Amino acid sequence: MKRTPPSRRAGFTVVEVMIALTILALISVNISMVIRTSTAAYGAGVFQSVLEDQASQTMDRISLAILSSTATSTASVPQAPLSTSSVEYSTVLGYENGHLVSSDPERIEQLVAGGLIQWSKDAGSTNANTVVWASGVPSILEGETPNGVDDNGNGLIDESGLAFEATGSKVTIRLTLQRKDSEQKQHQKTLKSVVTCRN
């Protein structure tokens, strides 16, 4: 009589199931880490892009205002290595009876207390207009420390987050904006523009 061997039961042992679950858990953890890192990198990139757009828009506004001003109205802007965080100017409106007609005095300034850039027209009068153009302006420009030395190598000493410096009819504008993202990581953007007064 022929004996048949006992059949093996199909299935997995407890050890095999545990190994499979461990491998699955490791794969899941790695996938979630990759997704989290990718999401954080994307968020930081978007945040930096928005900050750069805000800095560019603010610099464009300031540059356009200075561009349309008269060189004589920006004559009080110091030359390097000094700078100022505010500028007063007038824009040319045209000519009347052969005489140059200028706008009421305008002012762009950094308010250190609130980290703001403020534009004002006809300040001190009852018809004064004031608009905040930007926030998040640090008290000192990126790379600089208030120590009487040119720390960031741009030729200026202890310049603020918004700095104006003139050479003849050309005004150099430097601007730093900074913000913290949701993870409290600091982001900064610094821009420089050289504008020649048209009039």
Image: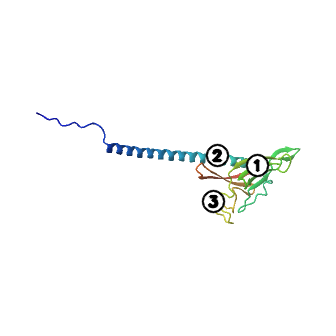
Checking the image for residue 190, the label placed there is none
Q: Which residue is mark 1?
A: 119
The residue under label 3 is which amino acid type?
Gly
* Disc 1 element: strand
Residue at mark 1 to residue at mark 3: CA–CA distance:
26 Å
Q: Quadrant of residue 174?
A: bottom right
The residue under label 1 is which amino acid type?
Trp
- Identify which residue is drawn at 66% across, 46% down: 54
Between 126 and 33, the one lying in front of the other is 33
Q: Which residue is mark 2?
A: 53
Q: Quadrant of the N terminus?
A: top left
Do tag 1 and tag 3 residues touch (Cβ < 8 Å)? no
* Disc 3 element: loop
Query: Does label 2 or label 3 sit earlier along the sequence?
Result: 2
Residue occupying the far left of the picture: 1
Do tag 2 and tag 1 residues touch (Cβ < 8 Å)? no
Rendering coords of residue 75 (x, y %): 79, 56
Structural crowding at the residue carrying mark 2, measured as other residues with C-alpha within 10 Å and reported as few (<14), some (14–19) or many (≥20)? few
Between 70 and 145, the one lying in front of the other is 145
Structural crowding at the residue carrying mark 1, measured as other residues with C-alpha within 10 Å and reported as few (<14), some (14–19) or many (≥20)? many
